[in-house]
Structures are given as C-alpha cells and as structure tokens.
Image (cartoon, rainbow, N blue to C red):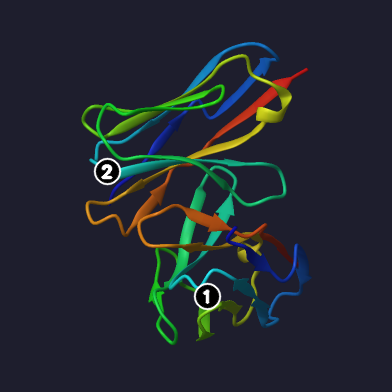
Amino acid sequence: DVKVTQSSRYLVKRTGEKVFLECVQDMDHENMFWYRQDQGLGLRLIYFSYDVKMKEKGDIPEGYSVSREKKERFSLILESASTNQTSMYLCATRGGIYGYTFGSGTRLTVV
Amino acid sequence: TQLLEQSPQFLSIQEGENLTVYCNSSSVFSSLQWYRQEPGEGPVLLVTVVTGGEVKKLKRLTFQFGDARKDSSLHITAAQPGDTGLYLCAGADNYGQNFVFGPGTRLSVLP
C-alpha cells in the first residue's frame, strides 16, 4: 500500500514563527500535493508538485511556500505563521489519473 | 472554475437505516471519486467512477455517476456506526489531471 507520512499530528506555533510541515511518500509517485481543510470550506489546494524541484501554485498559495528536493519528500513552509493559518493540513500523493492517497494530517494551531 | 456541491451538509441517523448523499455540479467531469474521512485522519479513497450512468457497489455502499457526468450519489444500506465520517466527492477535469473537492457530507450513525 502507498503510504504517506506526515511528520507531526499536532503542532502549536506562535504568530510570526517559521513553520515546516514535512511529508514523505514511499510509492515513487511523481505527483504530490498540499491541502488545507477547514470546516465548511472543504479541501483547498495550496501547492502541488509534479516532479523534483518543480512546484506549482494551487488555489490559495499566499503565505506558503514549498520545497521538493527529493522525489519522496514534499515540504510545506509557513514563512511567518499567522492565526488565520490555523487549520488541518493534508499531504497527498497521486499516481497518474488514480485517486489520492492522503497522510493522516497535521492539525496546526497558531497562537 | 469547476465547483462541486454536496448535500446534505450534515446527516444523523440510527443504525440500520438507509441513506443517500449527493454530489452535484454544473460542470462535466471525466471521472469522479468518493472518499471517507474519519475524525483525526486523512480521507481514504472508496471508489472511482468514470462512465456516465455507471453504478458501482462496495458491500453496503452503492455509487452512481450521472448520465451527463455532472452528478453522483452514494447510497448506504443498513448503516452502521462504523460508517460515521465525512464523505467527500472529487471531480476530475477533462484531462484527468486537476481535481476539485466538494465540501463534504458529515454522517453520524448512532447505535
């Protein structure tokens, strides 16, 4: 089975901190994604990557950046965390046209 | 921009009842997926439907893709507490590369 592992289940950070969310997949998929999930708004795409060193903005990239130095690892960076970035963050991989495999999520609280 | 609506937003039923949840759009999708997300976890793919009018069964779950490929339904027979979760639909564009998620239906099955 494809496994997508997110480094932290819960994080509490202070406003203005730089935050790194790490995601690792073990299935050699090219496509990796970062979503945030908020009540009533569903899943919103932040950034995605189709290959190493490659990144594309999703629907809500403001305040975020990403890094993909290796195929299996896709990191989401909050340069200066703000309270409106409190959310559930989900990393996912997708093999071609098939469905997504999601990690368990990181619930980030910015205080 | 393709948008997906899901109804109802919330549903609470007793164990053993039947239910149907809906996923609707004004756009045509090349395929549509259903996911279930349990509390504190990432969404898990249940099924992918690709042909207009297609019906797929997964034990007590029946999925249907509309003839025009703009809508889908999920029917659960004899619901069990283990069916509790957030049900998400996701539609793919004509190239099968870009997916959009609906906001979800939150189902609670009471014992």
Q: CA distance from mark 1 to mark 2?
A: 31 Å
Which of the two marks, 1 or 2, is nearer to us in this view?
2
Q: Is residue B99 above or below residue B88?
A: below
Q: Is disc 1 surrounded by few (<14), some (14 to 19) or many (20+) residues within 10 Å?
A: few
Residue in view at x 70 percent, y 15 percent:
B15
Q: Between B110 and A108, which is closer to the camera in this rendering?
A: B110
Q: Which residue is label 2 attached to? A: B29
Tag 1–tag 2 contact (CB < 8 Å) = no
Q: Is residue B16 above or below residue A65?
A: above
Q: Is disc 2 surrounded by few (<14), some (14 to 19) or many (20+) residues within 10 Å?
A: many
Q: Is residue A3 above or below residue B91?
A: below
Give the number of the disc on residue A36. none
Q: Amino acid at mark 2?
A: Phe
Q: Which residue is label 1 attached to? A: A63
Q: Between A11 and A15, which is closer to the camera in this rendering?
A: A11
Residue in view at x 24 percent, y 32 percent:
B52
Residue in view at x 70 percent, y 81 percent:
A17
Q: Chain of mark 1?
A: A
Q: Amino acid at mark 1?
A: Gly
Q: Position of residue A65 (x, y in %)?
A: 51, 80
Q: Position of residue A108 (x, y in %)?
A: 70, 64
Are dots 1 and 2 on a single chain? no
Q: Position of residue A71 (x, y in %)?
A: 50, 81
Quarter holding residue A40: top right
